[in-house]
Amino acid sequence: MKVLAYCVRPDEVDSFKKFSKKYGHDVDLIPESFGPKTAYLAKGYEAISILGNDNANREALEKLKQYGIKYLATRSAGVNNIDFDAAKEFDINVANVPAYSPNSVSELTVAVTLCLTRKIPFALKRVQLNNFALNGLIGVELRNLTLGIIGTGRIGLKVIEAFSGFGMKKMIGYDIIENEKAKKYIEYKSLDEVYKEADIITFHTPLTEDNYHMIGSKSIDKMKDGVFIINAARGALIDSEALIKGLKSGKIGGAALDSYEYEQGVFHNNRMNEIMKDDTLERLKSFPNVVITPHLGFYTDEAVSNMVEITLSNLKDFEEKRNCKNQRMCK
């Protein structure tokens, strides 16, 4: 199959070379992101590969149809950037990578949680200014806190297992489908109960129409004073304006954001020496109790390799079977 891979980072190149040979694909790699303005680059190919921040909207997918492209494989678990109604209408088969290394996200979740609870970023900034005083740096111990996990699938389970080693006071969770393996560590509660009881709330769920802005003013009001919020899933799970309001009031004790609802076109790009137009992001960056990372939870050597291999494996299945186990359908 002749494949064009968009938005390819240097760290993906070796994996593409290795697994292109394994699965017999002819793959060209370009750094450009996929979207309506770059869809024309796919003319002459049979399939494309994109990333989670690319814009596979109706306009872009309609251009793929014009070029006769029937397969789109995203090198990500998230698919909220893809218009599935349009894909179905234009007969474009879509597959994702649901099973890359879950340890990558779980380890980052633990790391940023510790950053918040021990005020590590604030301490590092002060040391750079030769301020070695302790005032304002007192932290809290995880063993005295209740952890609330929203989303207990493959990644959520790894997060649960990782935090279990810290001897948390209690671990509770919520998911539409309960994970039997997670029940060894957590007690399942209603969503409102998790909001009410947890000192730390961490999200590991895909973004859907039903959970868009699930963290807003109403849900924040239900939470404990000083709650820590961790989002290593999808940015639009959180209403950023409501989050800022909660941070200003002190209702929210801190937030760690590896994803942000308006990150497209910003995260994974170098914007140094540019004037940032997103005032919401700038306000979030200004809080000393907010840790922002550029959607790098997935970004480990093993996970990157997995993403590329599974993507090319998906396209091989499409080529030989006309479907694959990771195919995503319009709901």
Image: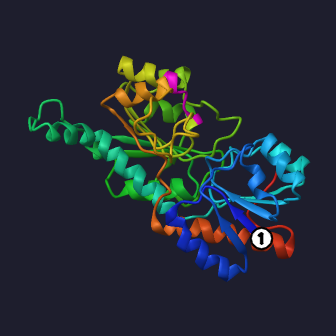
Image-based side of 124 in relation to 260, left or right: left
Neighbour tally class for label 1: few under 14, some 14-19, many 20 plus, Cα within 10 Å: some
Is 11 contained in the magenta span?
no
Amino acid type, label 1: Lys
For mark 1, what is the residue? 2
Image-based side of 25 in relation to 163, left or right: right
Q: Report x, y in % for residue 161.
A: 43, 59
Foreground of the two, 101 or 198: 101
First to last magenta residue range: 236-242
Q: How is the image coloured?
A: rainbow
Is 238 contained in the magenta span?
yes
Q: Is residue 80 above or below residue 50?
A: above
One can see residue 331 in this view: no
Q: Quadrant of the N terminus?
A: bottom right
Image-based side of 180 in relation to 133, left or right: right
Image-based side of 233 in relation to 82, left or right: left
Q: Name which residue lies at 76% across and 67% down.
A: 325
Q: Name which residue lies at 85% across and 60% down.
A: 70
The image quadrant of residue 311 is bottom right
Foreground of the two, 155 or 290: 290
Q: Is residue 20 above or below residue 10?
A: below
